[in-house]
Every structure is written in C-alpha cells, then in structure tokens.
Amino acid sequence: MTKETILEVRKQFEEALNRAKDPASLEKVKHEFLGRKGKVAGLFSMMGDIPPESRKEMGKMLNKLKDDLSEAVALRSEAFASGKERAKRIDYSLPGYAVHRGSQHPLTRAVDDMLSIFERLGFDIAYGPEVETDWYNFESLNFPPNHPARDMQDTFYTEGGGVLRTHTSPVQTRYMSSHEPPVRIVAPGRVYRNEAISARSYCLFHQIEGLYVDENITFADLKGTIELFCRLYYGKDVKIRFRGSYFPFTEPSAEIDVSCFLCGGKGCPVCKQTGWLEIMGCGMVDPNVLKAVGYDHEKYSGYAFGLGVERMVMMRLGIHDIRILFENDVEFLRQF
C-alpha cells in the first residue's frame, strides 16, 4: 500500500458520491467504502505489510480518509433528509410568487425616443469616445488654448493627458474629419463636468448632439428642424422660442425654450414663474470649426444643436431632482 493507493480510493469515493442521487444509492456507496469488508477496511488490513518507519504516517492518512468519508456520507444523508422534509411542507396548490418585470430606465427610453424622431428626420447616428483629446474636445471646436470660454466647462482630466468629454460636440469634428459633406448626424452619449452635485446638476449627464453640413444651409433650416422635433417629442401644442446666446463653436448662437407643460405657460416653481423651460443650445457652425476639419467654409455651411437628456426627461415626467435618475431606486424605477 502506498500514498497513491489511498488517494485513488478517495477519488473513487468522490466519484461514487457524486453519482448517488437518493438515500438508497448513498447506502450502497457507504457499504462499498466504509462497510466491514469495504475498501477502507481493506486498506487497514494491509498495514502489516508497511515498513515500521512508515506505519505512523500511513496510519494517520488512513484514519483521516475514514473520517472524511464518514463525514461526507453523513452530510449527504442529512441533505437528502432535509430535502424530503421540505418537499412534504410545500403546498403546490398555493399561487406562485409574483414576478416583477423589468423596464427601461427613463433615460434610456428618452434617448431611444429622441433618436427615433431624428432618424425619421433623416439623421444618421454617430458615436465617439468618452475619453477625448484636448484637440477634439476644445481646439477643433474653436476653443484655443487660454480661451476664456474654456472656463464655461469645469473639466475632468486623466493622468494620460486626456479629458472626460464635457459635451458630445467632439463627435462633430471626429465625424467630419473622416466624412465628406453632406453630413447629417446626431451623436448621443454621456458627458462629464466637475460640478457640484445638486437637485439641478450632476457630475455626469447625457447629451444628444446634432449636426447638418451641406451647401446653402441656413438658420431657417435649423429652426424648422428644432420646431418639428419639439412637436414630435412634446406634442403639437408645445410653444417654442429662440433666444440669442453665445457658444464658441456656433455663430450666430441661440438657446431654445419650450412652454412649461406643467403649468401651461402660466408660471410655476419649475419654470421659475416664467412659463418657459430651456431645453437646448444651437447655432450655425462657426467657419473655424469647418476649417479645422478641412471643409471649404465658403462653400459649405451648417447648423448644430445640443440637448440635455436629463433636463428634458425631468420636464416631461415632472421630476424635481436630477439625482434620483442616477440612484437606481427600485420604487422610483417601477413607475416606468
């Protein structure tokens, strides 16, 4: 008898135990290995053939083998017994447990709805990386180094010198750098800004960027697209207004408000008693952006817009705190 012999018996026992699916088959395994004429007893009978200097070590191994096998049989026997008792306690006539069905997160649903509208309006969908270079996130969009407009966005920087994109606008120049006009895309995605977290702001949020570049594109084209989108998303009765604004990558620029659908334009705390809610910024693509990607800015023109998904979802669903959209509260999500 050798150590390998003991290990082989242990292996045979484990295989036999795995095949035992009921108390009767378990009893056969017990008899085969732990019975008076079982394999373990057979090993003990061979102790006289072992050299005296090895008997102590081999005896310990055999005793441990017997104890381990006995414990394994006892545990399996208890498992069979508890399973049998549990089966007796089950009342199969009782109704089953209710299964709660999952649903799309309101942000996911909103993005899908908006992209569906833009696809119907003839826009393709483009994506870009969330970790950007300074050139794509700033310089290609007419943010030169030390430009004061960079202070408009508090940025997260990576150790490798990249930035977590502060807007989805870099997808514009990434796409134009590899595609010839005409270009008509929307770019959805997460963006990051180093802002204090409050009921109205968060360190990450979602944007959908829009871009249309071709010959003879005018502000009237932009206005018609935005008005149609708002009516398709908010309903035909929504009212829209354009206010002059400033963005480094568009000129002229504007911000877009829609009539507050919570108060019908009469004024409420959500719209700060104005009757209007801001939903996006827009404007004609600045010629410097077109030159940065190699487009002929005298031949081509275009418009761009960017909307904040969280803001639009909060308005549409009457949510007063942006943080609840990121907390994964099951009771809140079950409403959708």
Image: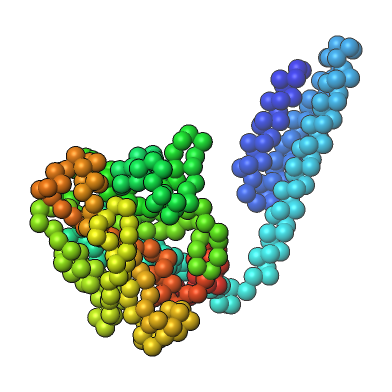
Depth order, front residue of 209/30: 209
Tell me: 251 left or right of 335: left
Q: Where does the image place residue 232, in percent across and percent down from the top left?
A: 25, 74
Q: Quadrant of the C terminus?
A: bottom left
* Residue at the spot 24% in from the left edge and 60% down from the top edge: 252
> Does 69 sit above or below residue 125?
above
* Residue at the spot 31% in from the left edge and 46% down from the top edge: 142
Q: Residue furthest bottom?
A: 266
Depth order, front residue of 188/82: 188
* Residue at the spot 62% in from the left edge and 74% down from the top edge: 91
> Does 229 sit above or below residue 161?
below
Q: Where does the image place residue 197, in percent across and percent down from the top left?
A: 55, 61
Res. 38 image quadrant: top right
Depth order, front residue of 73/246: 246
Q: Quadrant of the N terminus?
A: top right
Q: Where does the image place residue 227, in percent across and percent down from the top left?
A: 23, 72
Tell me: 72 left or right of 331: right
> Does 183 sit above or below residue 227?
above
Q: Where does the image place residue 259, in percent across and percent down from the top left?
A: 33, 80
- The colour scheme of the drawn protein is rainbow
Tell me: 109 left or right of 172: right
* Residue at the spot 89% in from the left edge and 19% down from the top edge: 56
Q: Is residue 279 visible?
A: yes
